């Protein structure tokens, strides 16, 4: 028995719907907030807070090193 074009289209449509339904949860999961998107109560994201902490530590290290190398007067 030979498949008619209507029967072939129907099975193709079902495959497309199945594929869509299987991929939909993956697409929706990718839309969640990441660590960089969720701002805290101060309006700074966790990634920005880490960068600010690293910059403050670098400034502290530079200041401490500069004070240690100065000759006392």
Image (cartoon, rainbow, N blue to C red):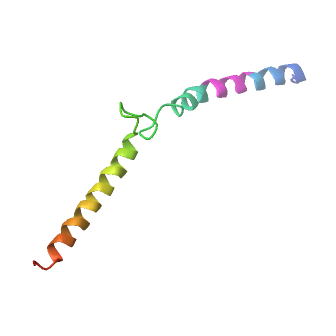
Quadrant in which residue 19 is drawn: top right
Q: Position of residue 62 (x, y in %)?
A: 25, 67
Residue at (58% x, 31% y) in the render = 27
Q: Residue at x 39, y 45 (%)?
A: 47
> Residue 60 appears at what percent x and percent y?
23, 60
Residue 26, position as x, y percentages in the image: 55, 31
10 shown above or below 31: above
Tell which of 47 and 3 is nearer to you: 47
Residue extent of the magenta highlight? 14-21
Regarding residue 64, the answer to whether it shows in the image is yes
Residue farthest along the left direction in this orientation: 72
Q: Quadrant of the N terminus?
A: top right
Residue 4 in sight in this render: no
Q: Is residue 67 left or right of residue 32?
A: left
In the picture, measured across the screen, residue 39 lies left or right of residue 3, that is left
Which residue is painted at 45% across and 37% down in the image?
34
- Give the number of marks: 0
Residue 6 position, x and y percent, is: 87, 19
Q: Is residue 65 magenta?
A: no
Q: Residue furthest front?
A: 73
Q: Quadrant of residue 45?
A: top left
Quadrant location of the C terminus in the rendered image:
bottom left
Of residues 55 and 72, the one nearer the viewer is 72
Asked if residue 15 lies in the magenta stretch, the reply is yes
| Residue toward you, 50 or 30 | 50
Q: What is the magenta segment's predominant secondary structure?
A: helix
Vertical arrangement, residue 66 with respect to residue 29, above or below: below
Of 60 and 34, the residue lying toward us: 60
């Amino acid at each position: 028995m030979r498949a008619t074009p209507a029967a072939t289209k129907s099975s193709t449509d079902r495959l497309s719907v199945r594929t869509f339904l299987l991929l939909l949860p993956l697409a929706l999961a990718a839309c969640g907030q990441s660590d960089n998107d969720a701002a805290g109560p101060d309006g700074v994201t966790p990634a920005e807070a880490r960068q600010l902490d690293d910059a403050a530590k670098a400034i502290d290290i530079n200041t401490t090193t500069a004070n240690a190398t100065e000759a006392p007067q």
